[in-house]
Amino acid sequence: MAIEVVPLTEADIPDAIEIIQSAFAEDPYFKWVFDANNFNKARNHDSLAVRCRWGIDNAIFQVAKETPPYPGDNGDATTAPASRVVGVSCWLPPHAPSEPESWYTWSQGWLLSARQALNNLRHWGRGGLRTNRYWIWKARQHEAQSQIWDDPKGYYFCNIVAVRPGTQGKGIGRKLFEAVTEKADQEGVKCYLESSRNEPNVQIYEKMGFEMAKEMECRDGDDVCMLYCMVRKPRSKY
Ligand SMILES: CC(C)(COP(=O)(O)OP(=O)(O)OC[C@H]1O[C@@H](n2cnc3c(N)ncnc32)[C@H](O)[C@@H]1OP(=O)(O)O)[C@@H](O)C(=O)NCCC(=O)NCCS
């Protein structure tokens, strides 16, 4: 199976969304922050589409593409698509805390919020998002990052990583990670992620060089969601 990791394009967005929605369907954070009885998949789709378009210009949004022959194909090269998306990742580039946010970054963030507000109007609400829990998570995340992020160069922040169910465990996640961790190694910059699953994800990320930095508890009454904050130090080849 030949896999290449390339920047997300407009044409890849439908596949990227399908992968994110299917890979995260059973995710503990997703189940905690969304009310399953009121979950609106179309609203979630439109929210992810806005995020993807923002990411093309403002983040390191990449897709892993597989080229034919695909497993299970009848080998008919005329009907097989030239390539298909099997994984997606979104990383925020490092930002030195001493540097103020640029006007461009600020305006793009504002535009993202405005487009999400339009989605709220179009879909009559937030599609089952429990906003109180969203803000609990944001507050815990702010605390955790304030404690952990002490490097003046900033951190590559892995925001989303998802591999198409059925193709997981075949090295695609590693390829998506290495597309950024190799750059981080060359630049001597640390990487950071928050995993919403302990098993098997923490073990998977340890294999990519991440180490546990903090176990973050998001609590809403008796309903708790744990997130695992992990940091990867740059590696030198020499
Ligand atoms: C987590 C995820 C992105 C990893 O991608 P993947 O393609 O399945 O992972 P890979 O096949 O590249 O495996 C990477 C490493 O982890 C190991 N690994 C994979 N699955 C594992 C498992 N279930 N248990 C232990 N180790 C595992 C592999 O052996 C490999 O190590 P190696 O290269 O040293 O042999 C993918 O499984 C996924 O999308 N999961 C569902 C969504 C999700 O949880 N996203 C992240 C939310 S924080």
Image (tube, rainbow, N blue to C red):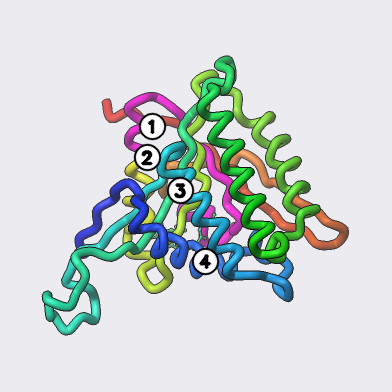
Residue 216 image offset from top left, x and y in percent = 70, 46
Q: What element carries label 2?
A: helix
- The verdict on residue 203 being magenta is yes
**Disc 3 from disc 2: Cα separation:** 20 Å
**Mark closest to the chain's N terminus, 3 or 2:** 3
Residue 84 image offset from top left, x and y in percent = 28, 65
**Mark closest to the chain's N terminus, 2 or 4:** 4
Vertically, is 177 above or below 153?
below
Q: Nearer the viewer, residue 47 or 133?
A: 47
Q: Which of 53 and 207 is in front in this view?
A: 53
Mark 4 vs mark 3: in front: 3
Mark 1 vs mark 3: in front: 3
* Residues at circles 2 and 1 in contact by the CB criterion of under 8 Å: yes
Identified at 62% across, 57% down, the residue is 119
Q: From where the camera sits, is residue 41 visible? A: yes
Q: In which quarter of the image is residue 143?
A: top right
Vertically, is 154 above or below 209?
above
| Quadrant occupied by the C terminus | top left
| Magenta residue span | 181-205
Name the residue beneath numbered marker 4. Answer: 21
* Residues at circles 4 and 1 in contact by the CB criterion of under 8 Å: no
Q: Name the amino acid, label 1.
A: Ala
Q: Is mark 3 on a helix, strand or loop?
A: helix
Q: Which mark is residue 53?
A: 3
Name the residue beneath numbered marker 1. Answer: 184
Mark 2 vs mark 4: in front: 4
Q: Is 93 positioned to the left or the right of 4 in the image?
A: right
